[in-house]
Amino acid sequence: MLNRLLDFLTAQEAPALKKTADDLQLAVAALLVEAARMDRNFDAGERTTIERLLAQRFKLEPKVVQSLIEEAQRKVEYSAQYFPFTHQICKSLSLEQRIEIIEMLWTVAYSDGKLDPEEDMLLRQIAGLIHVPDKERGLARQRALQALAEQAASTSSAQRV
């Protein structure tokens, strides 16, 4: 153990880092978790929304999504900044794909039926950090609201049947 520490400190050997999730997936999951936590109430509905969005976006199995969210929660709890997550998104995704991430964030923010000022502030901040123009951020918001309305309508019509 001491030899490994000395090797690391003298730059002779890089420490072995355990990678449990793709960096991009983890970055997106962390921002979605942060959006859900902004109103200090990360409820089951928001978690379900995050699970669905991650599974769809990255084509992941439910168990993988669960562990990804758990890892993202740990990262968010111990991180005081968004830069590592937003930097990963910027270097990995095109503008269109970054706009999709903003739409996912809006979906999480509105999944509890209301938008808190802290959530709105976070979305503005993240959009700026991943270089999504205000107009595109607004259009992503409208698409997210439309999709949530359609989802609510289909759920209520299915319950009536």
Image (cartoon, rainbow, N blue to C red):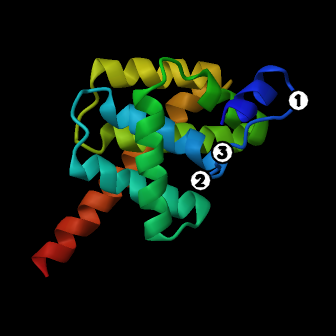
Q: What is the C-alpha distance between the residues marked 1 and 2?
A: 25 Å
Closer to the chain start, of discs 1 and 3, is 1
Up-down: is 96 above or below 64?
A: above
Q: Label 2 near label 1: C-beta < 8 Å?
A: no
Name the spot of residue 63 as percent of width and height, x first.
Answer: 44, 68
Amino acid type, residue under disc 2 in the picture: Thr
Of all residues, the one furthest to the front in this rendering is 2
Q: Residue at the spot x=65%, y=51% of the render? A: 22
> Could you say which quadrant of the image residue 14 lies in?
top right
Q: Nearer the viewer, mark 1 or mark 3?
A: 1
Q: Residue at the spot x=42%, y=38% of the render? A: 74
Of all residues, the one furthest to the left in this rendering is 160
Residue nearer the viewer, 161 or 69: 69
> Could you say which quadrant of the image residue 48 lies in?
bottom left
Name the spot of residue 86 as percent of width and height, x first.
Answer: 63, 28
Q: What is the C-alpha distance between the residues marked 1 and 3?
A: 28 Å
Of all residues, the one furthest to the bottom in this rendering is 161
Residue nearer the viewer, 75 or 49: 75
Residue 24 marker? 3
Closer to the chain start, of discs 1 and 2, is 1
Q: Give the residue number, with chain letter if any, for mark 1.
A: 12
Q: Give the residue number, with chain letter if any, for mark 2.
A: 20
Up-down: is 54 above or below 101?
A: below
Q: Residues within 10 Å of mark 1 (few under 14, many from 20)?
A: few
